[in-house]
Image (cartoon, helix red, strand yellow):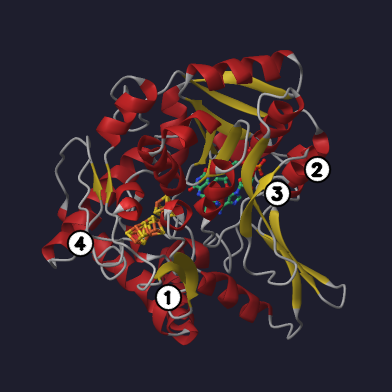
Amino acid sequence: MNMKPSNNVESAGIISSWLCTGCGTCAAVCPKKSIILKIDQKSGIYLPNIAKDKCNLCGICLSVCPGREIDLKNLNQIVFGQEANDPLLGSLIKCYAGCASDCHIRYSSSSGGIITALLAYALKERIIDGALVVRADERKPLEPYSFVARTIEEIICARTSRYCPIPVNNSLREILYSEGHYAVVGLPCHIAGVRKAEKANEKLKEKIILHFCLVCNHTPTFRATQYLLSKLNTGRAVKEIFYRGNGWPGAMTVRYQDGSERFVEHLDFKYWGFIFQRFFWPRRCFLCDDKSGELGDVSFMDPYLPEYNRSEKIGSTLFIVRSPFADDLINKAIEDGVIAGSEIGKERIKESQLLQEVRQRNRARRMLVKFFKQSIPLYSGRPKGKVKITDLFKAAFDYLLIRSGDYSFYAVDLCCYTWKAGKRVKSLFLRN
Ligand SMILES: Cc1cc2nc3c(=O)[nH]c(=O)nc-3n(C[C@H](O)[C@H](O)[C@H](O)COP(=O)(O)OP(=O)(O)OC[C@H]3O[C@@H](n4cnc5c(N)ncnc54)[C@H](O)[C@@H]3O)c2cc1C
Ligand code: SF4
Ligand code: SF4
Ligand code: SF4
């Protein structure tokens, strides 16, 4: 491993060059407990703060950090005993479409509630003693946090996606110092951090037996939620936010202190229909090249396919099974009626996530940033490919959009009005 002793994640430039994903792995493994992740209000993401008087420059934090480098080639060998067998999806055994058999879980989760149902099943069958998941903080409703769920109620309570930064791996420390076997649920960068930490720490590797990965295009910064709340314009104090739920694709529920509620459809213009999709990206996410979560034992995603877009109302999850252990668990869960699932072709998964387009988009983004002599994260084993000039222009445009949210909400408003006006003019021309 390319580990430089005498460096920590700060002195190695991970934070100053915007390579930090805010995963929290460094904080969990630091033997001196000298790292705390804090929200940087300006960028709306978590960044590590290092107490320099406590740090002995042992370099452990840097060795587990997925910010600058994820050696997918080497980690695939260690984890799956082979190099990735698909250039876009990574190592895989088979792919499924399915849902939780419990209607409440299915309806109130993000997609089809498969993660929640599988974790609850693994806990009930004593395959695991707990699972690293996330939940809302009653005192800080806009800042969900990670914890180790040890009961089925806690796992159900942690369901649904939360589209804001969470340093999930902070809680790895609890697993490291507990007896038993555990599952972890995280985004691709969280899971990469876990795999790197397992490589450095045999004990952790023995304890974590399931790695459930959410497919991830990006995590919107805290400013995205703040913007959306400002557009709801209620002036009331927020008690709770559920980013998903209410069927598929579902809606966000904002519950206020006075007991009132507001719903925002998942594909509303203020939400994933435009704002969350286009603005408020952390810079590290702009350069991420592991959308499908190649280091998970299973990767889970929404079923963005024509047949589901047309008729799915309750919820379904697509998932890629990568390890024999997870494959076994899924087969048993299907046999026992905990989840319903049927195999689908891997090309459908690529189609649902536009993976070919995303890979091309990423190449262009990385080339653009490199041209301006900025640091880019390394993902080994990616095949080289050509970059189209149109993709380069698009990358530059995307970059301007994601950065505009860093300055002010007025900049975002201005972009939205221009976009809407452009659409109206286009439709007038088409009509004539
Ligand atoms: C930031 C983000 C981006 C995503 N991007 C895409 C995408 O581009 N395309 C796509 O198809 N799917 C994406 N997903 C995944 C999708 O939203 C669903 O999570 C997935 O389909 C699983 O659905 P489910 O109903 O089976 O999960 P559920 O049963 O609802 O369980 C979700 C699990 O994820 C955990 N979790 C929730 N939020 C986070 C978080 N921020 N970090 C770590 N763990 C979390 C919960 O604790 C819970 O255990 C994204 C999810 C997130 C959080
Ligand atoms: S381990 Fe995670 S939180 Fe820590 S510096 Fe690296 S990317 Fe950032
Ligand atoms: S003590 Fe070691 S792990 Fe902790 S911050 Fe310093 S270099 Fe990193
Ligand atoms: S896009 Fe990549 S870096 Fe950003 S949150 Fe998702 S997995 Fe992490």
What residue would you read off at disc 1? Answer: 43
Q: Which residue type carries mark 1?
A: Ser
Measured Cα–Cα span from mark 4 to mark 2: 43 Å
Measured Cα–Cα span from mark 4 to mark 1: 18 Å
What residue would you read off at disc 3? Answer: 158
Q: Which residue type carries mark 3?
A: Ala
Of the numbered discs 3 and 1, the one sitting upstream in the chain is 1
On screen, residue 110 above or below 306: below
The x and y percentages for residue 115 are 64, 36
User: Which residue is at a point 65% across and 48% down the rendered structure image?
Assistant: 249
The x and y percentages for residue 166 are 54, 59
Q: Which residue type carries mark 2?
A: Glu
Of the numbered discs 4 and 2, the one sitting upstream in the chain is 2
On screen, residue 198 above or below 7: above
Numbered disc in front, either 2 or 1: 2
The C terminus: image quadrant: bottom left
What residue would you read off at disc 4? Answer: 375
Disc 4 secondary structure class: loop
Q: Which mark is residue 153?
A: 2
Badge 2 residue CB within 8 Å of ligand 1: no
| Mark 4 and mark 1 residues within 8 Å of each other at the beta carbon | no
Of the numbered discs 4 and 3, the one sitting upstream in the chain is 3
Badge 3 residue CB within 8 Å of ligand 1: yes
Disc 2 secondary structure class: helix
The x and y percentages for residue 332 are 67, 15
| Mark 2 and mark 1 residues within 8 Å of each other at the beta carbon | no
| Mark 4 and mark 3 residues within 8 Å of each other at the beta carbon | no
The N terminus: image quadrant: top left
